[in-house]
Image (spheres, rainbow, N blue to C red):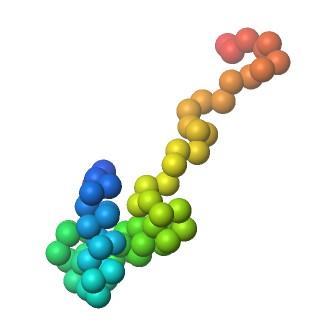
Amino acid sequence: MAKRKISPDLKECAIRLGELGWDVQLIAETLCVSPASVYRWRNIFEEIQSVTRPSSGLAGRLLSLHGGGMS
């Protein structure tokens, strides 16, 4: 199965369904996602009150700051 981008709206829907008392397995089946994803989104939401983590800013290739040229 290919990794797909899940919209924040769908993640928020999963959180709301959980708050309404839905079982994680039922949420996952209804939204066509894995139960692990539902648990992860719930944990992230409890931690930072958002279903998406802010970017760490640590992406891409590292650059040398010592003036050594890249070959």
Task: List the single residue furthest toward the left.
Answer: 30
Count of numbered circles in the view = 0
Residue name at image x 49 percent, y 54 percent? 53
Residue name at image x 32 percent, y 55 percent? 8
Residue 31, percent from left and from top = 20, 69
Which residue is at the front of the view, 15 or 28? 15
Quadrant location of residue 33? bottom left
The image shows residue 7, relative to residue 17, as above or below, that is: above
Quadrant location of residue 70? top right
Residue 43, percent from left and from top = 48, 72
Residue name at image x 17 percent, y 75 percent? 30
Q: Quadrant of the C terminus?
A: top right
Q: Is residue 19 left or right of residue 45?
A: left
Which residue is at the front of the view, 33 or 14? 14
Residue name at image x 68 percent, y 24 percent? 63
Is residue 34 something that shows in the picture?
Answer: no
Task: List the single residue furthest toward the right.
Answer: 66
Which residue is at the front of the view, 20 or 61? 20
Q: Is residue 33 left or right of residue 43?
A: left
Q: Is residue 52 left or right of residue 17?
A: right
Q: Quadrant of the N terminus?
A: bottom left
The image shows residue 51, relative to residue 16, as above or below, that is: above
Is residue 13 something that shows in the picture?
Answer: yes
Residue 46, percent from left and from top = 50, 71
Residue 19, percent from left and from top = 33, 80
